[in-house]
Image (cartoon, helix red, strand yellow):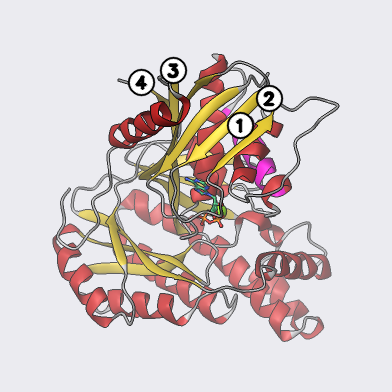
Amino acid sequence: MEVTGATQIPAISELAAKAQKAFVDKFGCEPQCAAYAPGRVNLIGEHTDYNEGFVFPMALPQVTVLVGRKSEGNLCRVLTLADSVDAPNYVEFPVPSAETPLKPGTPKWANYVKGVVANYKGTVVPFDAVVISSVPLGGGVSSSASLEVATYTFLDVLTNSGSDISKKDKALACQKAEHEFAGMPCGIMDQFISVMGQEGHALLIDCRSMEGQLVPMNDPNVVVLVTNSNVKHELTGSEYPTRKKQCEVAAQLMNKKSLREATMKDLEEMKSKLDDVTYKRARHVIGEIIRTEEAAKCLELGDYTRFGKLMVESHNALRDDYEVSCPELDELVSAAMEVDGVYGSRMTGGGFGGCTVTLLKKEAVEKAIQHIQKRYSQTATFYVCPPASGAGPLALV
Ligand code: ADP
Ligand code: MG
């Protein structure tokens, strides 16, 4: 759908063709295989995945693509066409073995690829590959998971071993890659949705049982608008682990395995024993888990008005209790909520910058883009995003 003011999302085939050309330029031969995996936008359920709660993402039409082929020798050689990564944009590393396991290093971007190679549940063969992506990097729509899952899927295609492990184990291997090689103790959401997303559906993931439930999201009159604030506040990097720790402390104090097990009543009873910050963190998580389950039901019923209200409640809790928003995200959400036909809007992803997600009537989308941009103090980028499909192989032409 072409929308004035929105950035056109390139077709996967277009990305693959560009990567294919770059591959020929770099390696002097044609690539043999290709795979892609999508980024994701989380509709609601933020900072709940590592608390064993519910999350409700959908796969985006923006994807990461790897094209490549088996190579001679013992090296894996990877070129990324992304322009905002740390230099150099090309790396070589040996196929790992028991004696020479892979370790994270520099450039940092390659750690996502290496982490997947190291955690691949099959035999890794030497390969050459080119990476290209339409997922904004560091924008809170999980370019990292899309790179991991695209790499895993590429290795499957390269070695013809696509069906050897379950989708769940594949997602978990990619999550492990992010933990061990990117030093990011993320939950399971990003990798799960990148593997399991389906066109026209959002996925309610129960991060305790690790079960996913697809919920149709294909009303032609309703649109998901992803707005990139194009800011990323440089923080110490410890915010995510700190929040995670605070949640663990709160759960422990309430004698619960995780905040998933806790109710608002449990929290209120413990209030005097918790410091104010820990209390607020837990209040966000417990409330968000309830909101997320309800939101999935609303979507099933087509109750977009209630869904939108839950999105705004989610944003407010992330801003006030979890304290992971920032002025730019707050501006984008406030501006979106001023537009007729907007059901709801919230920050999405880890926070401190990145994107917002807005649910609105299709007829309101151009007006919404115009209004949000007019009210925003910076320059935003807008994407109209129908729920897309999870990772898969690609045919090269
Ligand atoms: P997000 O996942 O929200 O986009 P992260 O900080 O988790 O943000 O991941 C972004 C990082 O992932 C980038 O800085 C880069 O290191 C790596 N990355 C993502 N996509 C690519 C790509 N196409 N090529 C190389 N590195 C990438
Ligand atoms: Mg990420």
Q: How many numbered callouts?
A: 4
Residue highlighted by disc 3: 32
Left or right: residue 33 compared with residue 86: left
Q: Which mark is residue 170?
A: 1
Q: Nearer the viewer, mark 3 or mark 1?
A: 3
CA gap between label 3 and label 1 equals 22 Å
Q: Quick one: label 1 or label 2, which is nearer the N terminus?
A: 2
Residue 292 lies within the magenta run: no
Residue contact at pointers 3 and 2, CB within 8 angstroms: no
Q: Position of residue 336 (x, y in %)?
A: 29, 74
CA gap between label 1 and label 4 equals 21 Å
Q: Quick one: label 3 or label 1, which is nearer the N terminus?
A: 3
Q: Report the span colored magenta.
A: 167-179
Left or right: residue 340 compared with residue 316: left
Q: Residue furthest right?
A: 99
CA gap between label 1 and label 2 equals 8 Å
Residue highlighted by disc 4: 395
Q: Position of residue 352 (x, y in %)?
A: 53, 72
Residue highlighted by disc 2: 121
Q: Quick one: label 1 or label 4, which is nearer the N terminus?
A: 1
Residue drawn where x is 37% and y is 47% of the image = 134
Q: Position of residue 158 (x, y in %)?
A: 53, 19
Q: Which SS class for mark 4?
A: loop
Q: Amino acid at mark 3?
A: Gln
Pointer 3 local density, CA inside 10 Å: few below 14, some 14–19, many at least 20? some
CA gap between label 3 and label 2 equals 21 Å
Residue 172 lies within the magenta run: yes
Residue contact at pointers 1 and 2, CB within 8 angstroms: yes
Q: Which SS class for mark 2?
A: loop
